Amino acid sequence: MKNPAPAGFFFACESVSTQAMPKACRRSDALAIIAASFFPRFSLPMYTLARELLFKLSPETSHDLSLDLIGAGGRLGLNGLLSKRPASLPTTVMGLDFANPVGLAAGLDKNGAAIDGFAQLGFGFLEIGTVTPRPQPGNPKPRLFRLPEATAIINRMGFNNLGVDHLLSRVRTARYRGVLGINIGKNFDTPVERAQDDYLICLEKVYGHASYVTVNVSSPNTPGLRSLQFGDSLKQLLDALAERREQLTLEHGKRVPLAIKIAPDMSDEETALVAAALVESGMDAVIATNTTLSREGVEGLAFGGEAGGLSGAPVLHKSTHIVKVLAGELGGKLPIIAAGGITEGAHAAQKIAAGASLVQVYSGFIYKGPALIREAVDAIAALRR
Ligand SMILES: Cc1cc2nc3c(=O)[nH]c(=O)nc-3n(C[C@H](O)[C@H](O)[C@H](O)COP(=O)(O)O)c2cc1C
């Protein structure tokens, strides 16, 4: 079997010439990647070149290297110089002001390692995490698979993260002052009946540092987690969060919006029940959607049978359908943040047309780089004209 193709990437800048690189850089992939980031304005698309180079590394190695580079570019203030910024498209949702409605989805920067770096690429908002109360290693590797024929990814990372305290240390040192969502989850060894405890620990810790907090009940890679989306489990969790938020509002003198992130693998009836529960408990937004357990669109492809959540192009219609159903049920009572399968600007516009107020990208960003942010902002701006 072929090695898994990498899901990592680096594209803080968008054009580079191999001619322009020192010879030594051509001898070493890793060096070439680093050098490439400092020779930005030449002929080949930087993103294409960087992807080629990163394909030679294992998925997680290239992912980690990319994060390091984006982080380093951010600290040096380089990323903003190296990629053309999207147009400004101010948007107010949940009482928060967004520079544009296109955000980074959770899971790419789980520990807040590269907040300034991602911000400089032009995102209108960032969501970091999923973070858990205690650090945890996640599932055994390999756990990340790229399916380029389908512009898709399968992952079963399992909330690998350094814990909420570490994440907060990174948030404190970031210079970014835009909208920052912090996505919270439960440790894998916390029984699902006690999941609420983990969410409340994280909510309390991140409250003073987040523009909004996302409650992730939809990862398919933490056993039992998705059961929290239904019935009494959902109701109890939402009520507990709402109650604790009331106390935190008084303590901090600010009301931080709570968003609930749901899965695409729900029937219309189940989606309608979730919508009603969110309204009833006073939640502020819904994020639709996380990855899917379906393998439609990747049958027969290399790694198509790997366990985990599928994201990217194959989840587009499933996720947009959930957005439509939610929009019908919610009737504007709470905003929808759409994620799932946006690999072109037009897809972002489709999500807004379906009833979303904001969009987030992950897999499409891996495949297309920061150009996707600009494309999406432009497509959404065209809808407003
Ligand atoms: C490798 C990987 C890791 C992810 N980790 C998280 C996570 O920790 N928390 C979360 O809420 N979503 C996570 N997601 C889901 C994304 O945030 C997003 O909801 C989903 O991938 C659909 O969007 P996309 O098709 O643009 O990738 C992850 C996705 C991928 C591909």
Image (cartoon, helix red, strand yellow):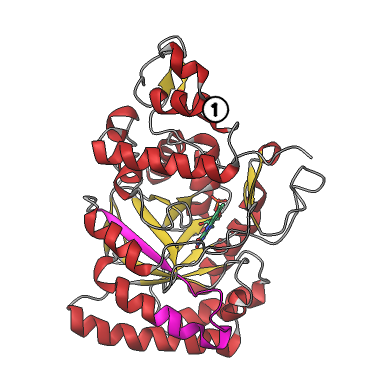
> How many marks overall?
1
Residue 315, image x and y in percent? Answer: 64, 53
Regarding residue 280, the answer to whether it shows in the image is no
Residue farthest toward the top in the current orientation of the protein: 19
Above or below for 367 versus 170: above
Q: Which residue is mark 1?
A: 53
Q: Which portion, as a residue range, is magenta? A: 178-200
Comparing 132 with 369, the one in front is 132
Side of 292 relative to 172 (left or right): right
Above or below for 254 versus 300: below
Residue 263 quadrant: bottom right
Above or below for 351 versus 166: above
Regarding residue 362, the answer to whether it shows in the image is yes
Residue 351, image x and y in percent? Answer: 52, 53
Residue 187 magenta-highlighted: yes
Residue farthest toward the left in the current orientation of the protein: 253
Residue 257 magenta-highlighted: no
**Ligand 1 closer than 8 Å to the CB at disc 1?**
no
Dot 1: what SS? helix
For the point 47% across and 37% down, which residue is it? 372
Comparing 198 with 368, the one in front is 198
Residue 201, image x and y in percent? Answer: 37, 80
Side of 76 relative to 196 (left or right): left
- Amino acid on which disc 1 is placed: Leu
For the point 53% across and 49% down, which residue is it? 350
Residue farthest toward the right in the current orientation of the protein: 300
For the point 32% across and 50% down, which residue is it? 115
